[in-house]
Image (spheres, rainbow, N blue to C red):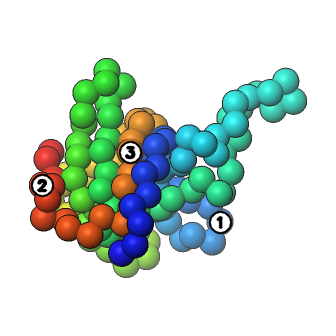
Amino acid sequence: MGKEQLIKGTLHLYSETGTEGGYWAIQDERFIDPPTEEWPHEHWSYDGLHPLQDGDHLKITAPDGSIYWEGFIQLKQHPLFTEEANGFWIHADQSGLDRKFWATPFFKNFKGELIRGINDQETATPQP
């Protein structure tokens, strides 16, 4: 797979015109600029956008600092416009997890750590 890459940031459902639904993603914290006087909201660069992929290792941290979930991503894909979460069309669910449990940290912008490029998926087991 190549060199491992660690991405720390904010979880969210990435969707915009043309995506025809949302993708579970993490926004790299290095590409989030704070609000300014001219723009009172954070600015997220596309350079920091990382939709989740099968084989990624994700650790989700709850607001209280506890580990909400940790494991390897294995997405169950859905046909367009057939499945939704919180009123948004989605392209996939994490296999083996309840959709509400899975979607909650993405809609509430929990923090996460994503590792790409891990070769041996058998070294970690998903934990609900």
Q: Which residue is mark 1?
A: 17
Separation of disc 3 and disc 2 at Cα? Answer: 16 Å
Q: Is residue 98 left or right of residue 52?
A: left
Separation of disc 2 and disc 1 at Cα? Answer: 35 Å
Q: Residues within 10 Å of mark 1 (few under 14, many from 20)?
A: few
Give the secondary structure at mark 2: loop
Between discs 3 and 2, the one toward the N terminus: 3
Is residue 69 placed above or below 78 in the rendered structure? Answer: above
Q: Given the image, on which type of amino acid does mark 2 rest?
A: Thr
- Judge whether residue 88 can be spotted in this image: no
Q: Which residue is mark 3?
A: 113
Task: Please give the name of the residue rendered at 38% of the width and 45% of the height, measured from the top-left corner.
Answer: 113
Q: Which residue is mark 2?
A: 125
Task: Please give the name of the residue rendered at 20% of the width and 67% of the height, measured from the top-left corner.
Answer: 120
Give the secondary structure at mark 1: loop
Q: Given the image, on which type of amino acid does mark 1 rest?
A: Thr
